[in-house]
Image (cartoon, rainbow, N blue to C red):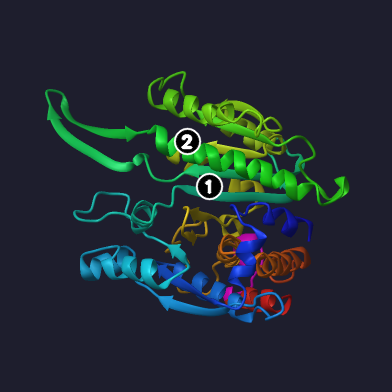
Amino acid sequence: MHSALRSVQAVTRRTASTAAAAAGKQLTIGLIPADGIGREVIPAARQVLEALPSSVLAARLGFVELDAGFEYFQKHGEALPEETLAALRSDCDGALFGAVSSPSHKVAGYSSPIVGLRKKLDLYANVRPVVSGAAATASGARRAIDMLIIRENTECLYVKDEEQHEGPDGRYAVAKRRISERASRRAGEMAFAMALQRDGMRRLVGDADRTWKGRPKVTIVHKSNVLSVTDGLWRETVRGVHASNAAYHAGVDVEEQLVDSMVYRMFREPDAFDVVVAPNMYGDIISDGAAALVGSLGLVPSANVGDNFVVGEPVHGSAPDIAGRNIANPIAAIRSAAMLLERTGHAAAALAIYRAVDCVLAAGNVRTPDLGGSSRTSEVADEVCKHL
């Protein structure tokens, strides 16, 4: 239950009035399973959502099945159809995205649909909670961690502006990296807001139930000692968010970490971090690596967040080696569904899911192979539903 409570701290801004307004209304969720195990874990998340009792979720649930992904591209020539975007904008309050099998080599006409969703829906921050009561560190020690990684979601090298040329010494490739003041500021604002919100949540529980016991802290990740222009602008802008409202942010400590040092420290002393904010590519690498601290990518959820929309997305990939075998871990997708509920004002329902997942993980008798068990995807979903 303690980790469930800590997970609630990963909510982006929500208010009691939002929850009140949401009560009794239709909550329509777009479902985009996409590729590989996405087609197994997203139905599992839907099953858990539909099992929520009315005592914790007053809204009526509706679902819209939508297309996207590399496999869809291979059949239809587009990875993110306009019909999917139109449905999300006009019919849905939020969405769940499964996984995408983006190829590692260039494919003419193809672009990642999840990257496209982030840009077209202005989902400017990816929010990933990393919570464990006994994270395995590189030193062999086990430490309780409660870290939130906020990754800028719209630019950096992921603008995918690349060129290849022929030169006197052979071919060479160039990738353009975009770091803007606007995007950096928005990521910074979310990081400091989340640090204060998490601190407020922690004050509601006793010290014995808190993993992070210090003042709220934001760690700014960069490599401005080498990339002095792009990472320099990122660093300067995020620090400027803190300085621009010094009175409001007075209770938040600020530190910086070079990205290579951040990776080293994260694996040796992950309990040293509260809220971490990073440019897109660094945040992608850091947050995937952090999954090793909790045991599996199959446990780590995320939410792609904008001011008006949210897309829950499990951190793992499409895992083609196990796709279709009913052995993928659905926990990350189920937790991502809970994060979606939080953002749309249904905190009680989200908490019920977190608690149910925590009960299943604590019992340990229903586990998929990535956690050393032999249970099926469907069996894990059924077990979570029993604990709702």
The percent coordinates of residue 126 (x first, y second) are 50, 49
Residue 302 placement, left or right of 92 = right
Q: Amino acid at mark 1?
A: Asp
Q: Which of marks 1 and 2 precedes in the sequence?
A: 2
Q: Is residue 372 magenta?
A: yes
Q: Is residue 202 magenta?
A: no
In this view, the residue in front, 192 or 321, is: 192
In this view, the residue in front, 98 or 210, is: 210
Q: In this picture, is 167 found above or below 68? A: above
Q: Which residues are magenta?
A: 368-377
The percent coordinates of residue 27 (x first, y second) are 53, 74
Q: In this picture, is 92 found above or below 189? A: below
Q: Main secondary structure of the magenta part?
A: loop
Disc on res. 288:
1
Q: Residue at x 78, y 45 (%)?
A: 211
Residue 321 is at least partly visible in this image: no
- Quadrant of image for the C terminus: bottom right
Quadrant for residue 264, please give it: top right
CA neighbours of label 2 inside 10 A, class few (<14), some (14 to 19), many (20+): many
Q: Residue at x 50, y 57 (%)?
A: 316
Residue corresponding to mark 2 = 185
In this view, the residue in front, 358 or 196, is: 196
Tag 1 secondary structure: helix
Tag 2 secondary structure: helix
Disc on res. 19:
none
- Quadrant of image for the N terminus: bottom right
